[in-house]
């Protein structure tokens, strides 16, 4: 039973460790989620604004021949997100090159439905640091704010909100990254301990099963021994009675017959 007791103690110790790790893992997950939740209001607002757009809103933006500066800023920012390279066109001065984002950027709007879907289903974790560095000069620009963009284009205001939301999410996600890594490590550690607990439980069950069989075997042999002792005692009792009877016969007087 000492072996079974040791196994039971080990299981209890590992269960306590697993419980402690589970609490730790939950705390890390909740902490990381709280940080990510800080980005949600901006994301939800941007998604709701996008849902209000229809293909005609996008078609109108693409059809602009001389787009306002605010619209151009929005298209340029989208080029940064989707890694669209600008056209290099000759400037007024000799050898000067002007970066034209409007032509390649407005091509993103060719299929309005597909474009809006790409925004709604965009993989937020795919934004690169290079894109974010480019976006910084836009989101820091006082003229690149949703309320200002709204004055020139309702559709572009929604797109501007979306870009701002992606930018904010990136930085929050970067801050959360170490916590996510810690969470993965904690999950792995918890899984390892849970596996140890399962193995210890299985070992304890096997030990208890073996002990149960051994106890049953011992009980069976003890019963056999008891019966054997009873049989031996019965034999000894019979022998004792037989010996006493023989003694009585030998001690009885002999009868003499006279002819």
Image: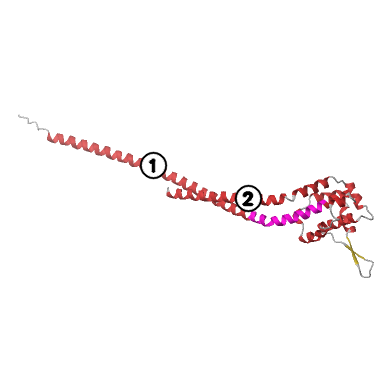
Question: Left or right of 22: which side holds 174?
Answer: right
Q: Position of residue 166 (x, y in %)?
A: 78, 54
The part of the chain drawn in magenta is: 161-184
Q: Position of residue 26 (x, y in %)?
A: 63, 49
The residue tagged 2 is 27
Lateral position of residue 188 relative to residue 163, left or right: left
In primary-sequence order, the first of circles 2 and 1 is 2
- SS of the residue under disc 2: helix
Q: Nearer the viewer, residue 106 or 43?
A: 43
**Residue 223 x %, y %:** 36, 40
Name the foreground residue: 82 vs 47: 47
Tell me which residue sits at (76%, 48%) in the image: 41
> Residue under circle 1?
219
Kind of element beneath mark 1: helix
Is the residue 56 above or below the residue 242 in the image? below
Q: Residue furthest front?
A: 142
């Amino acid at each position: 039973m000492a072996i079974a007791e040791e196994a039971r103690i080990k299981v209890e110790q590992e269960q306590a460790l697993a419980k402690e790790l589970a609490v730790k893992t939950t705390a890390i997950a909740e902490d990381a989620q709280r940080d990510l939740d800080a980005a949600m209001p901006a994301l939800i607002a941007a998604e709701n604004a996008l849902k209000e757009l229809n293909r005609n809103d996008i078609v109108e933006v693409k059809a602009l021949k001389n787009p306002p500066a605010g619209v151009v800023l929005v298209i340029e920012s989208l080029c940064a997100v989707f890694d669209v390279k600008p056209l290099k066109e000759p400037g007024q001065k000799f050898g000067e090159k002007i970066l034209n984002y409007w032509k390649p950027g407005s091509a993103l709007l060719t299929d309005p439905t597909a474009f809006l879907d790409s925004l709604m289903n965009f993989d937020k974790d795919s934004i690169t640091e290079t894109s974010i560095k480019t976006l910084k000069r836009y989101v820091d620009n006082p003229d690149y704010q949703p309320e200002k963009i709204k004055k020139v284009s309702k559709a572009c205001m929604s797109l501007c909100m979306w870009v701002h939301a992606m930018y904010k999410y990136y930085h929050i996600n970067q801050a959360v990254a170490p916590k996510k890594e810690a969470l993965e490590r904690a999950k792995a550690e918890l899984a390892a301990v849970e596996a140890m607990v399962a193995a210890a439980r299985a070992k304890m069950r096997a030990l208890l099963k073996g002990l149960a069989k051994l106890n049953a075997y011992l009980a069976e042999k003890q019963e056999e021994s008891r019966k054997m002792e009873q049989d031996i005692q019965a034999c000894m009792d019979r022998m004792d009675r037989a010996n006493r009877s023989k003694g009585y016969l030998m001690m009885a007087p002999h009868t003499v017959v006279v002819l």
